[in-house]
Image (cartoon, rainbow, N blue to C red):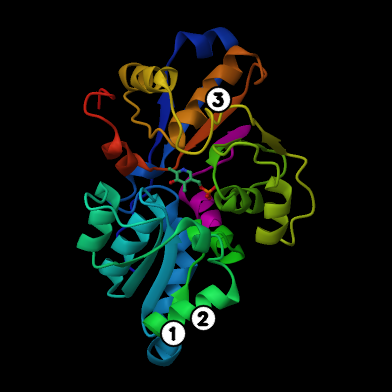
Amino acid sequence: MNLDILKPPVEKLEDPLFEEKEVNVSVLRLDKVHPVLSGNKIYKLHYFLEEALQSDNAEEKYNRTVLTFGGIYSNHLAATAHACKLLNLKCIGIVRGERHPKSTHTLKQCEADGMHLHFVNKLKYQFRDSKGFQDEMIALFGNCLIVPEGGYHPLGAKGASLIMDTFNCKKYSHICMATGTATTLAGILAAVPSSKQIVSIPVLKNMTDINERLKYLLPELEHTDNLQVLDNYYFNGYGKRDDSLFEFMNQCWVNYKLPLDFVYTGKMMYAVIDSIKNNFFKSGSEILCLHTGGLQGNISLPLNTLLY
Ligand SMILES: *Cc1c(COP(=O)(O)O)cnc(C)c1O
């Protein structure tokens, strides 16, 4: 599978706060692996795309077609659409909600990449993983490979583990990431030695089911003693934001030349830096933050909200 994915650089952040607290902070720039397929999504899609491309079942089983799900700003839909375009696969996006006349940048990009969009109302969308719903989609669109929303599936987690092959994790004591479906978290947990602390920052309100999610994604995982969840940094809920978040994101741009998105990585970095201030990280900690991409989502913000 040739998608021209680059090796993500690791960038060290400099800040008097980190010196004072005697910690080091670096960022794995997964947002830089590809101009469009940025972040964690292309890793989560890896094995699904491989499956859809299998030549011995390409025609009959999946019809060289991928079908997946997402909201109107979905990074996952955007990545799937573009990957399918590059791999010459057909692609269908089931979108939560009504079609708006103005659409969104994300959905326009998906359509420009050749994704066929099919809108379903929010009530019906809840049943997207049910057999009934999926049978209906197959009746409409023919045989296809169905990728759950956000790649939330053991195969998605297996793909996310590939992130750990892109850099040398030896020196880090902590690996921090934003958590949506927890698929990336599962992949990282599966691939790192249990001596490393894994820090998850949920971006959804009241995300109390991380352990159940991990059990589904990673049935063979025996313990999660090295997992820590910072569950107070969701800023009122998924996609919600306020001026303090934007101010923080602009500061990260000015101080570190680090562009963040407001749904995931902005909240993750806010949590990490706030937790350094609160002495959550012991002196001597070597902290690696995963920049999981998502910058295309910032286009939906009013002009001049962000300095970048
Ligand atoms: C989708 C996404 C996440 C969340 O990943 P999960 O595997 O669903 O937990 C994190 N960051 C960005 C930028 C994303 O687009």
Residue 53 is drawn in which quadrant?
A: bottom left
Q: Which tag is nearer the camera, tag 3 or tag 2?
A: 2
Between residue 236 and residue 176, name the one nearer to us. Answer: 236
Residue 304 is drawn in which quadrant?
A: top left
Between residue 68 and residue 24, name the one nearer to us. Answer: 68
Q: CA distance from mark 2 to mark 1?
A: 6 Å
As drawn, the label of residue 139 is 1
Q: Residue at x 29, y 59 (%)?
A: 4
Secondary-structure class at tag 3: helix
Quadrant (top left/top right/bottom left/bottom right) for the C terminus = top left
Residue count near mark 1 (Cα–Cα under 10 Å), binned few <14, some 14–19, many ≥20: few
Secondary-structure class at tag 1: helix
Closer to the N terminus: mark 3 or mark 1? 1
Residue 78 is drawn in which quadrant?
A: bottom left
Residue 108 coordinates in the image, percent (x, y): 23, 55
Residue under label 3, please give it: 271
Between residue 83 and residue 190, name the one nearer to us. Answer: 83
Instruction: Classify mark 1 as within 8 Å of ligand 1 or not, answering yes or no.
Output: no
46 displayed left or right of 281: left
Residue segment shown in magenta: 159-176
**Amino acid type indicated by mark 3:** Ala
**Amino acid type indicated by mark 2:** Asp
Residue count near mark 3 (Cα–Cα under 10 Å), binned few <14, some 14–19, many ≥20: many
Residue 87 coordinates in the image, percent (x, y): 30, 71
